[in-house]
Amino acid sequence: NAGVTQTPKFRVLKTGQSMTLLCAQDMNHEYMYWYRQDPGMGLRLIHYSVGEGTTAKGEVPDGYNVSRLKKQNFLLGLESAAPSQTSVYFCASSYEGGQHFGDGTRLSIL
Amino acid sequence: QKEVEQDPGPLSVPEGAIVSLNCTYSNSAFQYFMWYRQYSRKGPELLMYTYSSGNKEDGRFTAQVDKSSKYISLFIRDSQPSDSATYLCAMSAIKAAGNKLTFGGGTRVLVKP
């Protein structure tokens, strides 16, 4: 009963490096989301997807790209990491009802 | 002004007490209301999901929605130290694109043995 799985759990990058965060869900949910959570800022939506092959911008999309090639997977990419992208990143999925979250990826950009 | 306001706390209560949490909101289009619990270094966990106004009870948890006042509450009875966490309210409008949620900033709760 995995639910939403995020990999990696921790990562340290240097400014300018690129990486991809992986999210997988086994609940057959149509909708998937990427958030970042920062102290004092709460949860902010980066990008979301309403189905396989679709993506849309959220509240804070700049500096991030996403892809939803398979229904169960949602990838978040940082092409050129910046210190301002140091955060905890959460993936979530839903169909009807509330969203279900993974346990996050802690990302530090030096 | 934020769409959803939530006191950040911390709210400290003795074990066995009732924990009372609330959120106010400004968007009258919100129809779905949720409460999440988030432990340190974990993702938010869905606790309660309600539609429109009224009460919903699940074990020690009771959620109330008063749409006329744009006010929602979560009560935790017989609180335990394991209830120490941050509690987030969230809400969405009917047919919101992608079922997007608007979150409160969270209230940190400490239940002392």
Image (cartoon, rainbow, N blue to C red):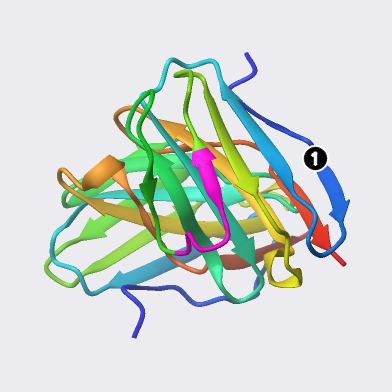
- Count all numbered tags in the image, as a single digit: 1
Q: Which residue is mark 1?
A: A9
Q: Residue at x 28, y 71 (%)?
A: B25
Residue A3 horizontal/vertical position (percent): 58, 22
Q: Residue at x 70, y 55 (%)?
A: A88
Q: Quadrant of the N terminus of chain A?
A: top right
Residue B71 horizontal/vertical position (percent): 27, 68
Q: Main secondary structure of the magenta part?
A: loop
Q: Residue at x 46, y 32 (%)?
A: A93
Q: Is residue B3 above or below residue B90?
A: below
Viewed as shown, does residue B61 lie left or right of A38? left
Q: Is residue A90 above or below residue B30?
A: above
Q: Residue at x 66, y 72 (%)?
A: A39
The three-letter code of the residue at mark 1 reads Lys
Numbered disc 1: what chain? A
Residue B48 horizontal/vertical position (percent): 41, 41
**Is residue A102 magenta-colored?**
no
Q: Residues within 10 Å of mark 1 (few under 14, many from 20)?
A: some
Q: Quadrant of the C terminus of chain A?
A: bottom right
**Is residue A63 magenta-colored?**
yes
- For the magenta stretch, what is the residue range? A60-66
Q: Is residue B15 visible?
A: no
Q: Is residue A34 visible?
A: yes
Q: Nearer the viewer, residue A8 or B101?
A: A8
Q: Is residue B105 above or below residue B16?
A: below
Q: Nearer the viewer, residue A97 or A13?
A: A13
Viewed as shown, does residue B37 lie left or right of B5? right
- Dot 1: what SS? loop
Viewed as shown, does residue B75 lie left or right of A9? left
Residue A102 horizontal/vertical position (percent): 62, 36
